[in-house]
Image (spheres, rainbow, N blue to C red):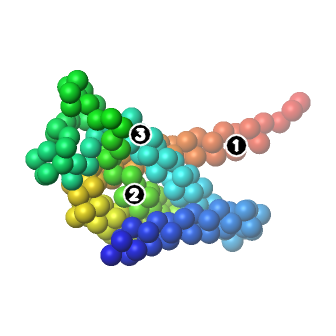
Amino acid sequence: MKFVFYDGIKRLLIIIGVVVLVGLIIGWKRSSLQPYRRGLIILLASSVFVPLIVGSLKAVTNMPCPKNVEIFGGTYPHTCVWESYGKRECPKEKQKCWPAGHASGGFALMALVFLFQTRRAKVLAMSSAMVIGWSMGTYKMLIGDHFFSHSVITMILAWLLILLIVRGVDSFIKWKIKSSNVQIA
């Protein structure tokens, strides 16, 4: 199960990222890829930045995994996000369980929505991203590494980050078009 829902999907996401990067590099000048260039850039940026930002949050939130919380047989008290531990309860090492890092890679694929033009393709892309993200998140919940809320927050955060990336890419494209139309007198 670990290979299917954890290692295998992670490898698939890396392969998708490499294929998108190679596709952008090789097809940059090809007019046949012109309609997909914006979507490919958004997908590549999302594949990098969503897991990077979620992973960075994990490093600072100091949240233990459910299996490590006292009420589930662990040694740490239940805390809320960014809540302080008591002096006697403070973990010796940083806890890195919130938000759901591995599911972030799957949820980053929600950016596929911006690659396709038809409603049917967009629905299929979003559905696929949700299945992949929730498969990874559910696996981690079943082994005690995350609560349901960890994956929900990761999904919402991924979507917000993707929307910021879309805005940034669109702003850059508008700026590039505007600057290329400026004529020197």
Task: Identify which residue, 138 or 166, lies in the foreground.
Answer: 138
Residue 59's disc is 3
Q: In this view, does 24 lie to the left or right of 104?
A: right
Percent across and percent down for residue 108 are: 44, 57
Q: In which quadrant is the C terminus drawn?
A: top right
Q: In this view, does 76 lie to the left or right of 153?
A: left
> Residue 102 — which label?
2
**Alpha-carbon neighbours of circle 2 within 10 Å: few (<14), some, or many (≥20)?**
many
Q: Which residue occupies the extreme top position in the image?
A: 87
Q: How many labels does the image show?
A: 3
Dot 1: within a 10 Å radius of its alpha carbon, few (fewer than 14), some, or many (20 or more) residues? few
Residue under label 1, please give it.
176
Q: How far apart are marks 3 and 1 (CA)?
A: 36 Å
Q: Mark 3 or 1 closer to N-term?
A: 3
**Which residue type does callout 3 highlight?**
Ala
Q: What element carries label 3?
A: helix
Could you say where residue 179 lies in the image, as x and y percent from the top left?
74, 38
Q: Residue at x 44, y 46 (%)?
A: 55
Visible residue check, residue 42: no
Res 2 → quadrant: bottom left
User: What amino acid is at disc 1?
Assistant: Lys
Q: Nearer the viewer, mark 1 or mark 2?
A: 2
Instruction: Give the residue drawn at x 28%, y 40%.
Output: 63
Q: Where is residue 41 in the image (x, y as percent from the top left)?
A: 60, 56
